[in-house]
Image (cartoon, coloured by chain):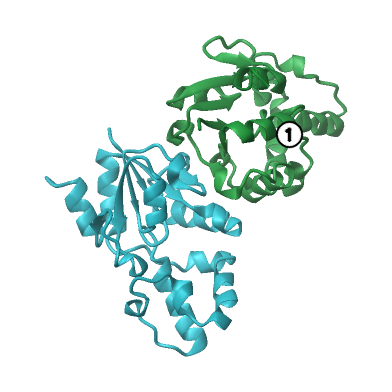
Chain colours: A cyan, B green
Amino acid sequence: MKRIAIDMDEVMADTFQYCLDLYNAEFNLSLTPDCFHGHPLFEIIEPAHRPHVRSYFDRHEFFAGIHVMEGALEVVRELHRHYELFVVSAAMEVPSSFVAKFDWLRQHFPFIPASNIVFCGTKGIVSADYLIDDNVRQLNAFAGEGILFTAPHNMNETRFRRVNNWMEVRALFLPEE
Amino acid sequence: MKRIAIDMDEVMADTFQYCLDLYNAEFNLSLTPDCFHGHPLFEIIEPAHRPHVRSYFDRHEFFAGIHVMEGALEVVRELHRHYELFVVSAAMEVPSSFVAKFDWLRQHFPFIPASNIVFCGTKGIVSADYLIDDNVRQLNAFAGEGILFTAPHNMNETRFRRVNNWMEVRALFLPEE
């Protein structure tokens, strides 16, 4: 059985959109994902607002509010029948998020056992056939085949096979379903 | 540069001894590591005491009190110059321990960057040349070469190359130093 490692934020969890919604609401703005084309979140928002927005990620209730990415639940459940799945999150960047991320995954994807959740820094340490991730740095570090999941910040990337949404993940990994 | 993954509890951290010291003190006992020859901690202690002892692992201050395994600091520092090191802990078994384990590692081994700390369930997901671990189940799951670090519970194991202490780790990985 082939093994797929799946990133959490921006792939399974719509973290960017939730963060943007909070930011817009708090600062009375109306930024859309298009405003971030090719740029990370923190490059576009006002420098003076950055520490405050970073602090979102220290709060358990922030993670609790994040929605599952459209289509992720259904497709991950299908993949689970044909592949060995691991969720691999670069959680070491925000140690205060460990429990919140773990709780989110157990709540929304209870069929993925805790033993198949990995918190790491670099995904070069991950042994899997595929990694689905929005982060090019992590795909570069990974030794298997990297699949780039579209997010506003990675729109200009051309180095990896790209999937734009979970329907395209299904088409790639379950072509006969 | 070859990559070595190193387990935390019972290898870098003398978790067993600290747990035993607390247990002996609380219940006015005088168990020694020899009492556990070939058996996990929870097989030997009184069934009625097990939930209480398990609760130690939910407390941040428990991890904060654990000593570094004798010789670990010096040898890990030396290995760090010749190998790519990752600390890989099966922390998913006790999610409440994430932050405490992370803080312990950052305090005692500050030269290991956060990016090289991994919390997982099974170590089959770890891509490394070597894994030094006291847990035979994890060594079996690992695809590289497993090195068994002696602990009371694994005394009867014969399936892996064994190191009895950190001096033997040094002799194995840095024979010319």
Q: Residue at x 71, y 45 (%)?
A: B104
Give the quadrant of residue B65: top right
**Could you say which is closer to the camera, residue A97 or residue B34?**
A97
Amino acid at pointer 1: Leu
**Could you say which is closer to the camera, residue B150 or residue A82?**
B150
The residue furthest front is B176
Q: Is residue A94 above or below residue B149?
A: below
Instruction: Check disc 1 and report its element: helix, strand or loop.
Output: helix
Chain containing the residue with disc 1:
B
Q: Residue at x 56, y 44 (%)?
A: B116
**Residue B46 horizontal side relative to residue A97, left or right:** right
Give the quadrant of residue B133: top right
Q: Is residue B105 above or below residue B3?
A: below
Residue B74 visible within the image: yes
Image coords of residue B130 (percent x, y): 51, 26
Q: Quadrant of the C terminus of chain B?
A: top right
Q: Residue at x 47, y 32 (%)?
A: B128
What residue would you read off at disc 1?
Answer: B73
**Could you say which is closer to the camera, residue A58 or residue A66?**
A58
Image coords of residue B173 (percent x, y): 60, 22
Give the quadrant of residue A68: bottom left
Image coords of residue A118 (percent x, y): 48, 45
